[in-house]
Amino acid sequence: GIYEETIALHEDGVDFVSENPGASYEVRCSMMGMLAGMKPLHRKLVSEHFNDEDAITQMLGDGFPMLEIMGSNDAFLQCDKLVESLKPIARNLEVHVVKDGSHTPFVDAPDEVMSVILRFAKKVHVHQTW
């Protein structure tokens, strides 16, 4: 089904944002969640923004705080692999895993996620060291 196809393409490193013959429109919509319900122009504006990866990497290496919230049952991301890939880059990384959470932990456990975000924001505000 579409779920299995999406997972297989994701594992192969397929780009789900741009037009890609390796991923059908339906699969890209499945992967991108809410973007699927947007008008084409809005989807394009939201999903094709430019990120300066070198600048972001430099900021994270300089200690800019990063909070990563993920679900333990995320079907699209492997928590341990994501954290291991971020550790060498993000010097001031905090990770919170929502037990039994999916790819959208803010839907699964909104109170828990909001509590984590608020605590992190207060900590960052008090300890502005970056």
Image (tube, rainbow, N blue to C red):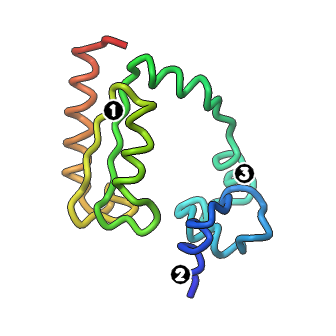
As helix, strand or loop, the secondary structure at mark 2 comes to: helix
Compared to residue 112, the image places residue 76 above or below, namely: below
Compared with residue 96, is residue 18 higher up or lower down, i.e. above or below?
below
Left or right placement of residue 58 versus residue 40 in this view: left
| Residue 98, quarter of picture | bottom left
Q: Residue at x 45, y 22 (%)?
A: 61
Q: Residue at x 49, y 21 (%)?
A: 59
Q: Are marks 1 and 3 in contact (CB under 8 Å)?
A: no
Q: Residue furthest top?
A: 129
Q: Amino acid at mark 3?
A: Lys
Q: Quadrant of the N terminus?
A: bottom right
Percent x, y of residue 70: 33, 53
- Identify the residue at horizontal 25%, vertical 44% (top origin): 114
Q: Going from the N terminus, do you reach mark 1 or mark 3 first? A: 3
State which mark lies toward you, 2 or 3: 2
Q: Which numbered tag is attached to residue 45?
A: none
104 or 97: nearer the eye? 97
Residue designated by label 2: 4
Q: Secondary structure at mark 3?
A: helix
How far is mark 2 from mark 3, CA to CA?
Answer: 25 Å
Q: Nearer the viewer, mark 1 or mark 3?
A: 1
Q: Amino acid at mark 2?
A: Glu
Q: State the quadrant of the C terminus.
A: top left
Q: Which residue is mark 3?
A: 44
Query: Which residue: 28% across, 22% down?
Result: 124
Question: Residue 51 location, x and y as percent?
Answer: 64, 34
Residue position for label 1: 93
- Vertically, is 1 above or below 88? below
- CA neighbours of label 1 inside 10 A, class few (<14), some (14 to 19), many (20+): some
Q: Nearer the viewer, residue 14 or 47?
A: 14
Q: CA distance from mark 1 to mark 2?
A: 31 Å
Tag 1: residue type?
Answer: Leu
